[in-house]
Image (spheres, grey):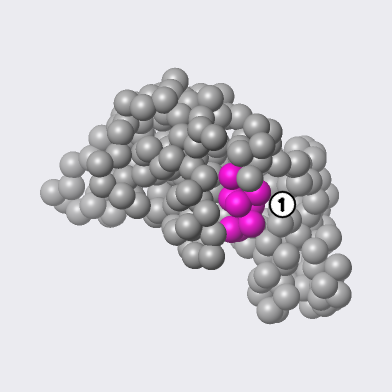
Amino acid sequence: MTRPKLAIAGLTACSGCQLTLLNCEDQLVDVARLFDLVYFPMGESGSDPDAVFDAAIVEGAVSTPADVELLFGLRNASHLLVAFGTCALWGGVAAMNNKVSGRDELVRQVYGDSGRIESFPPSPMGNFVSIDFAITGCPPEKHDLLALLAAVLAGTLPPLQSYPVCTECRSRENLCLLLEKGELCLGPIIQGGCNARCPATGIVCEGCRGPVREANVAQELELLLERGFDRKEIERRMSRFTPEWDYGKRR
């Protein structure tokens, strides 16, 4: 049996998504046995950037010329390109200040007066190349990554999930933080799959998994405004992980 060749790479990101693989402690031996990790700079030295891959799993937003070059190379060399994590799919935290005027001043605040960096506003991978599959999350869930790897072995893709965090809250019989406690929770418009981990502990959903398909953003905004929340605060919360919401439409 020929082992599928994998690339696991990062663009502008914190590397937390790549760590998801290394955190699959119980499955790492099987992953190493079943796959050929040809390109994985974070996990091993001697990676081959010029190889051809069955799948490239890439985290991070695109914000530098080096990001673009690496992304184009992986796209051209891979049968399957996977956007891995919220930054890769939506821009994520890296892009939350894209609309702030004066990018030069923002760069100075981060890197100091002597900092020199060639960059542009962080953007999702899909703005530059075609994406074959996506796993959202900040960081992604281990079970989502393992499902993808199992599907690659079978020559297919995992089924797409499309339900909000609220569905998982109700299945766990959690108290609704938005309707019953009056807190600013984004659960109705955020992609589920995390088993409502935060609301189950009394913490509102901050939207780290990005929007669920066909999210009724306008209705969520109206509901939050009716509950007395300030619009600027609502938009600030919503843009933390997904900067480009359309507040007047259903996604």
Regarding residue 79, the answer to whether it shows in the image is yes
> How many numbered tags mark residues here?
1
> x and y percent of residue 156 in the render?
68, 33
Residue name at image x 70 percent, y 78 percent: 202
138 or 202, which lies in front?
138
Disc 1 residue type (three-letter): Gln
Check the image and name the residue furthest to the left. 114
Callout 1 secondary element: loop
Residue name at image x 25 percent, y 35 percent: 118
Residue denoted by label 1: 191
> x and y percent of residue 180 in the render?
84, 76
In the image, which residues are magenta? 141-149
160 or 197, which lies in front?
160
- Residue 107 appears left or right of 84: left
Q: Quadrant of the C terminus?
A: top right
Regarding residue 229, the answer to whether it shows in the image is no
- The quarter of the displayed image where residue 134 is located: top right
